Image: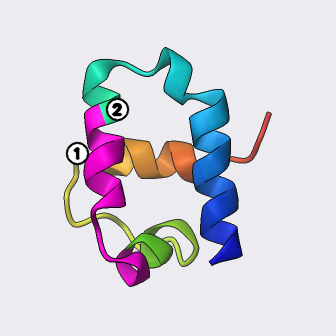
Amino acid sequence: MKELDLLLTRYLRERWPAASEAERGRFESFLELPDPQIAAYLVAGVPAEDTELQPLIDQLRKPPG
């Protein structure tokens, strides 16, 4: 999905360099989820079942700037 690519690429460009090791680990775990679940979290706004992922999801959904 193009939308997911844009959100994930923006995160990598803007946040990854300064992300803590814990945040990087959560991002890597997030990427292991099935694509439909990632889309539900990022595009449809479905809350994460894993509450530790929610701050990352909120960051990914945050508008640029």
Q: Which range is magenta?
A: 25-37
Is 33 part of what is drawn in magenta? yes
Is 23 part of what is drawn in magenta? no
Mark 2 or 1, nearer chain start: 2
Residue at 51% over, 71% down: 45
Task: Locate residue 4, reporting x and y percent.
Answer: 60, 67
Label 2 belongs to which residue?
Answer: 24
Instruction: Report whether 64 appears left or right of 57.
Output: right
Q: Residue furthest bottom?
A: 36
Q: Amino acid at mark 2?
A: Arg
Instruction: Report whether 2 appears left or right of 58.
Output: right
Look at the picture and state if 14 lies above or below 38: above
Question: Could you tell me if the residues under marks 2 and 1 are in contact, i.e. CB atoms within 8 Å?
Answer: no
Q: Main secondary structure of the magenta part?
A: helix
Q: Amino acid at mark 1?
A: Glu
Instruction: Report whether 12 appears left or right of 20.
Output: right
Q: Nearer the viewer, residue 58 or 19?
A: 19
Residue at 32% over, 76% down: 34
Task: Locate residue 28, reporting x and y percent.
Answer: 31, 46
Q: Quadrant of the C terminus?
A: top right
Query: Which quadrant of the figure has residue 20?
Result: top left
Q: Residues within 10 Å of mark 2 (few under 14, many from 20)?
A: some
Q: Residues within 10 Å of mark 1 (few under 14, many from 20)?
A: few
Task: Locate residue 19, reporting x and y percent.
Answer: 44, 22
Look at the picture and state if 1 lies above or below 65: below
Label 1 belongs to which residue?
Answer: 52
Residue at 64% over, 55% down: 7
Identify the secondary structure beneath mark 1.
Answer: loop
